[in-house]
Image (tube, helix red, strand yellow):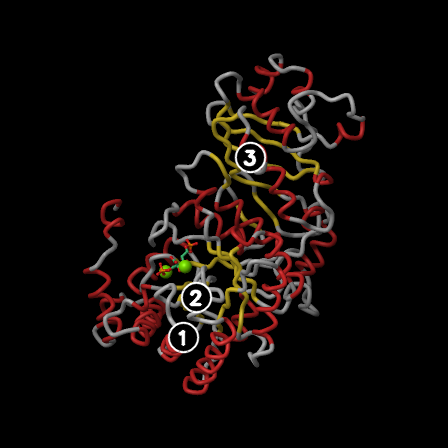
């Protein structure tokens, strides 16, 4: 137990933030965190970890005379250490946090000042564990992928989507035209790209109205429901809400629109505001700028797993979790798939913690038995809310195209996600509608257990996609392959 080895090197203040024998870290009082920590050369890993625990809970750089017996009870505690792997485990009394579920408050503690402290040369939050009693404080998702599936009547395959490209520069009418082409080609879901807002060449209100017309036309012609995810990120909350209300009063059917929020750049308050104001809408968390915190090369920040878990806590219906090395963005299969499974499933194995999303304490066997044996009403089991936090769906995007759908599904291991292909659709030699058809055909091939090459023999759109995307393989991927 390396904690003991370093304990005698601690000063009194540091000792107050270390526990050699924390009774049961999972007793429900603590949120648990595992950090990868590289100490400054002036101190050992436990001294550095104690300083981090202090600064990220009740302390500062000197012991203060104003401490009280109760304030000391709120100290975060280093309770485990792996010196070789540079890992430290810290337990946070979750009473420290703002009541009634506030994600930005927690992150301000655990990845706030501490990322800037001299005592560390590297500090990355790799995994977190929330006790059921803490989960209960948070909204979690309301309108989920299950609701979207019901609306679209799509069950045994991923939701097939696109991002309109060029990313910016189309007029509102041109934008809507591309939406129509994708939907009429067979696609289910279109999203605004992450920077789409109220640009003078594409006024927000006109974009909304043109999209509505395009959707109505596509629904009528295809007989299939469609969804559009509107980016409602804005300079201030009032404008964000105004955009939401504009969409809701434009005549869209409930379920036919989602609200996209740039959760990192617009902030967690925006995510939670949308969840609390619009529990009947799919809240789509785009994570632009997450790379500053999550990239493997960056010794400071947090993991994709941590970001995704907090998005579920905040009530996002879905968050981008990466293409597991298959697409254009950095991100390893292990990292992205772990994150995806931890927000999709009711219980997920993280890097260090197995997280159950049940809000019923696992020792409450009676309640759990009722949930399991709900054979008469099927209310409890169907309505996840009763027994725990609903699923948050992985949104898979970034450099994908029809030739990469099957490889991704094989890495992911399930079909319960939304995939959005931008260039992967609009770069098709015969344009968007054909690009959408190629995506649909690649999914059909997968479901039939036929290779896309085989299926392409009788599906020209797919054949042209294979030719184009294979010939123009992403140079970076080839170099890194
Ligand atoms: C994808 C995308 C998404 C990325 C974000 C882009 O377009 O629109 O924003 O998927 O990455 O701008 O790159 P392409 P992630 O399909 O044309 O790449 O999903 O990893 O957060
Ligand atoms: Mg984008
Ligand atoms: Mg893509």
Circle number at residue 280: none
* Mark 3 neighbour class, 10 Å CA radius: few under 14, some 14 to 19, many 20 or more: many
* Residue identified by numbered label 2: 158
Q: Secondary structure at mark 2?
A: loop
Find disc 3 in the rendering and name its residue: 34
| Structural distance between the alpha carbons of marks 2 and 3 | 33 Å
Q: Secondary structure at mark 3?
A: strand
Q: Are marks 1 and 3 in contact (CB under 8 Å)?
A: no
The residue positioned 36% from the left and 66% from the top of the image is: 165
Residue lying farthest to the bottom in this orientation? 220
Would residue 481 appear left or right of 110 to someone viewing this image? Answer: left
- Local crowd size for mark 2, using a 10 Å CA cut-off: few (<14), some (14–19), many (≥20): many
In which quadrant is the N terminus drawn? top right
Q: Nearer the viewer, mark 1 or mark 3?
A: 1
Quarter of the rendered image showing ligand 2 = bottom left
Q: Which is nearer the N-term, disc 1 or disc 3?
A: 3
Query: Which of the 4 image quarters holds residue 354?
Result: top right
**Point 61% across, 48% down: residue:** 356
- In the image, the residue with mark 2 has its CB under 8 Å from the nearest atom of ligand 3: no
Q: Which mark is nearer the camera, 2 or 1?
A: 1
Dot 1 crowding, Cα within 10 Å, few <14, some 14–19, many 20+: many
Image coordinates of residue 112 in percent, x first then y, are: 58, 38
Decide if residue 236 is on the left or right side of residue 402: right
Q: Marks 2 and 1, Cα distance to the nearest angstrom?
A: 19 Å
Pointer 1 residue: 179
Q: Say which of 433 and 153 sits in front.
A: 433
Image coords of residue 443 (percent x, y): 35, 68
Question: Which of pointers 2 and 1 lies earlier in the amino acid sequence?
Answer: 2
Q: Closer to us: mark 2 or mark 3?
A: 3
State whether residue 16 is above or below residue 288: above
In the image as oriented, which residue stretches furthest toward the front? 200
């Amino acid at each position: 137990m390396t904690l003991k080895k370093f304990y005698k090197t601690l000063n009194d203040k540091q000792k107050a933030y270390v526990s050699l024998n924390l009774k049961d870290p999972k007793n429900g009082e603590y949120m648990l965190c595992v950090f990868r920590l590289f100490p400054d050369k002036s101190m050992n890993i436990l001294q550095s970890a104690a300083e981090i625990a202090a600064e990220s809970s009740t302390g500062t750089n000197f012991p203060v005379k104003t401490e009280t017996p109760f304030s000391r009870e709120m100290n975060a505690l280093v309770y485990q250490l792996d010196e070789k792997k540079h890992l430290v485990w810290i337990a946070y009394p979750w009473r420290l946090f703002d009541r009634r579920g506030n994600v930005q408050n927690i992150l301000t503690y655990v990845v706030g000042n501490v990322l800037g402290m001299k005592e560390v040369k590297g500090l990355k939050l790799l995994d977190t564990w929330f006790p059921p009693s803490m989960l209960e404080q948070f909204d979690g998702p309301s309108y989920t992928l299950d609701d979207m599936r019901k609306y679209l009547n799509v069950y045994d395959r991923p939701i097939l989507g696109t991002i309109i490209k060029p990313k910016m520069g189309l007029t509102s009418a041109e934008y809507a035209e591309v939406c129509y082409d994708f939907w009429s080609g067979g696609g289910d879901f279109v999203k605004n790209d992450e920077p789409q807002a109220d640009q003078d060449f594409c006024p927000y209100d006109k974009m909304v109205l043109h999209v509505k017309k395009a959707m109505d036309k596509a629904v009528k012609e295809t007989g299939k429901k469609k969804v559009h995810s509107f980016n409602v990120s804005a300079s201030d909350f009032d404008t964000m809400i105004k955009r939401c209300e504009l969409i809701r009063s434009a005549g869209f059917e409930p379920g036919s629109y989602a609200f996209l929020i740039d959760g990192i750049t617009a902030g967690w308050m925006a995510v939670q505001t949308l969840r609390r104001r619009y529990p009947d809408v799919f809240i789509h968390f785009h994570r632009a700028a997450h790379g500053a915190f999550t990239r493997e090369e960056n010794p400071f920040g947090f993991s994709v797993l941590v970001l995704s878990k907090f998005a579920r806590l905040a009530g996002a219906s879905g968050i981008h979790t990466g293409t597991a090395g298959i697409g254009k963005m950095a991100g390893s299969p292990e990292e992205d798939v772990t994150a995806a499974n931890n927000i999709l499933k009711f219980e997920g194995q993280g890097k260090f913690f197995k997280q159950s999303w049940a809000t019923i304490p696992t020792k409450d066997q009676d309640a759990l038995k009722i949930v399991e044996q709900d054979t008469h009403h099927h209310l409890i089991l169907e309505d996840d809310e009763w027994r725990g936090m609903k699923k948050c769906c992985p949104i898979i995007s970034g450099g994908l195209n029809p030739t990469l759908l099957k490889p991704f599904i094989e890495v992911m291991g399930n079909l319960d996600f939304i995939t959005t292909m931008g260039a992967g659709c609009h770069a098709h030699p015969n344009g968007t509608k054909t690009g959408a058809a190629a995506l649909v055909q690649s999914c059909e091939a997968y479901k039939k257990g036929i290779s896309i090459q085989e299926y392409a023999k009788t599906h020209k759109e797919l054949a042209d996609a294979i030719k184009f995307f294979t010939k123009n393989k992403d140079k970076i991927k080839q170099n890194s392959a």
